[in-house]
Image: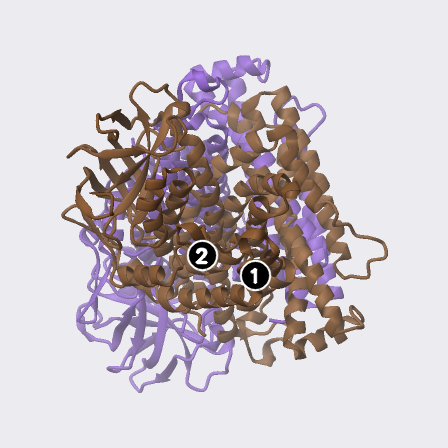
Chain colours: A brown, B purple
Amino acid sequence: MSSTDFAVDRRDIRFVQKEYLKVDDLCGLEPFGDFNPELFEMVVTEGLTFAEEVFFPLNKPGDEAGLKLENGLVVTPPGFQQAWKKMAEGGWMGMTAPTEYGGQGLPLSVAVAVQEALFGANPSLYITMLLTQGAAGLITAFGTDEQKKLFGERMIAGQWGGTMCLSESQAGSAVGEVLSRAVPAPEGHYLLTGAKQWISGGDHDFTENIIHLVLARIEGAPPGTKGLSLFVVPKHRVNGTGAIQAPNGVSTVRLEHKLGIKASPTCVLDFGGTAPCHAYLLGGAGQGMAQMFKLMNEARQQIGYQGLGAAAAALHNGLDYARERVQGPAIEGGRGSGQSAIIHHPDVRHMLATIRAIAEGLRGLMYKVAWMEDMAHHGPPDNREYYQNLADFLTPVVKVAGSDLGFEAARLAIQVLGGVGYTEEFPLAQNLRDIKIASIYEGTNGIQALDLVGRKLNLREGALLEALMHLISPMVPTRAMASPLRQAIVWWREALEGLSRTVEELRKATANHGPRQGVFNATGVTDYFTHVMLAHTLLDMALTAEEKLKGLFPEYPGDPHALAAFAAQNEEARFYFNKIKTAEHYVTQILPRVKAVEAAVASNSFAALEALW
Amino acid sequence: MSSTDFAVDRRDIRFVQKEYLKVDDLCGLEPFGDFNPELFEMVVTEGLTFAEEVFFPLNKPGDEAGLKLENGLVVTPPGFQQAWKKMAEGGWMGMTAPTEYGGQGLPLSVAVAVQEALFGANPSLYITMLLTQGAAGLITAFGTDEQKKLFGERMIAGQWGGTMCLSESQAGSAVGEVLSRAVPAPEGHYLLTGAKQWISGGDHDFTENIIHLVLARIEGAPPGTKGLSLFVVPKHRVNGTGAIQAPNGVSTVRLEHKLGIKASPTCVLDFGGTAPCHAYLLGGAGQGMAQMFKLMNEARQQIGYQGLGAAAAALHNGLDYARERVQGPAIEGGRGSGQSAIIHHPDVRHMLATIRAIAEGLRGLMYKVAWMEDMAHHGPPDNREYYQNLADFLTPVVKVAGSDLGFEAARLAIQVLGGVGYTEEFPLAQNLRDIKIASIYEGTNGIQALDLVGRKLNLREGALLEALMHLISPMVPTRAMASPLRQAIVWWREALEGLSRTVEELRKATANHGPRQGVFNATGVTDYFTHVMLAHTLLDMALTAEEKLKGLFPEYPGDPHALAAFAAQNEEARFYFNKIKTAEHYVTQILPRVKAVEAAVASNSFAALEALW
């Protein structure tokens, strides 16, 4: 272990999955009947090792080598091809894909641990895999039997790559402005023309073929999002057995030169500009946006995982360095008391506790949302709508929380290291560069905030928010509660009350001033939800930890010194003890940020809109 | 003008210097008697143009080319040498250096505008110049007449470079651990041995010689900071006329590979390891730390300017892009109303207003602190102590505010641009990478917070804080005040009251719990001071703007629509109108962050210190 390596927090992952969410109970649900707890554990353990041993060693070399565009083809860094192949051979590509198409059919809430680790170990490599699986998911959901078999199964197996082609130069956040056109050909396919940009994994040398899902407008279709359809566009045309026949008029025009994820090919693609491009309609005409949103919702949660992976990596590197690095006298002992490892300096400790709270809070929240998705799709039918409402509401929260707090963790970890954190010798500079993209792709965080505040808050007559309140409201600080967490829960409830007031103020702003004023603080309010949810999750996990701790230390809480002394001697007790302290840190040091949002909204001031720009 | 270029905000600089701080009045002070307002203006105008035309065009090429270490010598990017030469020839190096040593003797509060621009245009290049001038300042302050003439004057002229060599691998933030040794030689000089790291401008090809100021311990001197002396150590030995004689045993061992400021040579230097290294004591033995702090205090303020330069550049690029980029329907008009420039989207507007408030707030604050330094050194003798107290207290605030809020502005500007902001085609990615160093070098921001909270808050029996309160307390919202700023001032005063409570809580934490608990929230409390000071400065400037606006629009404030309509038609009125809106934005949207600090401190919770790490 060193501050330049990578290691997954197996203990915390086990806690969240087994002790907090009890994912083993999912084996009782119909589609997971073939699994058992040992199998879950084996998959996760092997997946984490795979991330550590296969993905991470390529992370820095990939960043340094970057990508080349040679003769119109993208050349990826040394070793990436082999890693893709190992991933495919190990069956890791289709972890959550249905078994009928060759996937492993794992619950999301089990697979998420491996996804977190792969993202943390090598985000550049993993993002292309993830989008391949996303595209495969759309084909298996909406495609014809032939499309499923020909394209979907090969993508799930990792034999072919996949992409999602939405953005055009005039159509980024405004997807409805797409100009790509599809004209029906007599043979039944379409001829597609258009240029797409920001295509992650748009070209690469991992696979012999790449299946693009392209958003385009069938000739004569109405303008705006309603006229958009989704097309399956292979890089190379194939026959019915999957044998490659000929290039399909897809060319890579440019590779973006980016701040981070430098080994992830972000391409400008041209369709049909150099040669005819055959495209196959996916599902019905005009269904493009609806189909795309299925993928986008999954992808947005997964971008959250990227932030979690980044935060967890930052915690590992920051903590390791702070334990090893000796510098300055311990404040307690004064000047005469010799040098101290920097982890003992209060400011460093504060930063590390924040990084830890972010990493563990994001893990708890994201695994829980993954579990909600499992329940929404496979749980008892009566509860499915409830869990879907929860997952839908929390999707933008997960995306924003992961990307923004992941970035904050990366920034703080650099600060823990000081000068060496600023060098590229340590992995934290790359971590910061890589994670920045997460606040931008799959819909900028501003778009997420609009989705949450402008749409989901009032969707289905408020049923989504209602479901959330139903989930979190039961956490109350009873008078009888002897827990040291009682006060933290009091503070959390105050924050929750402030959230209700703030949502009410937003509604008033819309009514009294207009729609622009109503969403002026959308980002702030999204942050408010983030902090309330992270604090709730950390407290909820701490309550679980408390129960476990009582089993080890029956006089809990007892005398604080006795408790700390016991925990210091017992590895399991120490873990649970720290879970409680982490929740307390978040509630007292981070959650209060919501007060700033409440005040900003309550000020009823929109100076930025009134200024003359 | 485009979103990939650089331009200095001349109008706002003129406002801060001439209208707000009235720097022209400094011509009435003794050492500035040879200046006049036209001369001040000419220097600033030419300096800003120099930054735009000479410095900025090298910024991106310098980042791309980086540095090489060839045969033990640092090779800088193409064009950097010539820019250094032009800077020296134009007399820009010694802008604020005393005229008796060849400097221009300008007030700091005049020169700061040029410094802001040089930092914004090309931080990699400017940092080496700045440290050269800092080192020259120490030599002219503490050196012998010969040292001043031989070394100081040549450095002020830019003929030779200069550095500050403090850190060693075991002595970063803990300067007292320095191991470098100096042994007296019979000839009167010392023989120095040691290795120093993080030396900005440690080697380069700009000048034929580099004068290092090296912190070392004379053989037999006591341990800790008290035993440290400062030595003048030329890269090449020279004779009394400055002619270069022979190499002086200084070698460049390594160049750091950094996240940003890639064209700034950050070196590991070895002294006396390969050949004897002659060193000349600066001032008295054991004075090293005191001397160094003179430079450090200047340098810390200047690192603040780096943040200001970064924020101003981010504002320019972000604003330009947001005005040009059309995307999505305007919310007001709904879907049918066509596409809108993104500057009209509320979330983008919120971000831009924040960036603007940061840039203009930092400018106001930093120019004001520079003016305090002018007054402390050259103002009426009775007030000098007062201004020195102010400047001393605000030095860590300036450093932290500049580096952290400059980073925030850079981050937000990337978000304004979205995908293109993440590419290296636009200057914002480099801006983010470059500014990150500012929170680390010249004392990490954690060290600054300790300086403010652990030291300056109680220094000279609290006289520093008292001076600050004397400065800012007079801003009160009188009942008679017809200004739209009245409510903002009310809110600012509430924040100020919260600050007093928070400082009191800190004192209690120290008394009740101990010194570690007393500084546990030092960073948060430093942020509290930052926000209170930035809001005060923005409000104070807005009150000045209001007076100017009344001159143009006598019925001010009058009907808000009439005022806005008038301001939209009149360029000057528009500028003043926006100053008021910017202050309002900061007070309502950013200042409330202090509530989180107050709550964190008031929680009296130190979970991060109690956790078992």
Q: Secondary structure at mark 2?
A: loop
Identify the residue at horizontal 37%, vertical 19% (top origin).
Answer: A222
- Give the chain of mark 1: A
Q: Position of residue B62 (x, y in %)?
A: 24, 52
Q: Is residue B345 left or right of residue A340?
A: left
Which residue lies under the disc numbered 1?
A356
Which residue lies under the disc numbered 2?
A104
Res A43 seen here: yes
Q: Position of residue A291 (x, y in %)?
A: 43, 35
**Nearer to me, B185 or A94:** A94
Q: Quadrant of the C terminus of chain B?
A: bottom right
Instruction: Tell me the mark number nearer the camera, choosing from 2 and 1.
Output: 2
Q: Is residue A169 left or right of residue A518?
A: left
- Asked if marks 2 and 1 fall on the same chain, the answer is yes
- Give the chain of mark 2: A
Tell me the amino acid under the disc marked 2. Answer: Gln
Res B401 seen here: no
Q: Quadrant of residue B187?
A: bottom left
Tag shown at residue A348: none
Q: Position of residue B251 (x, y in %)?
A: 25, 74
Please tell me how crowded label 2 is: few (under 14), some (14-19), or many (20+) other residues with Cα within 10 Å.
some
Give the answer, above or below, for where A450 lies relative to A123: above
Q: Quadrant of the N terminus of chain B?
A: top left
Q: Is residue A389 left or right of residue B268?
A: right
Q: Marks 2 and 1, how far apart in space?
A: 32 Å
Q: Earlier in the sequence, mark 2 or mark 1?
A: 2
**Nearer to me, A119 or A110:** A110
**Nearer to me, A198 or A471:** A471
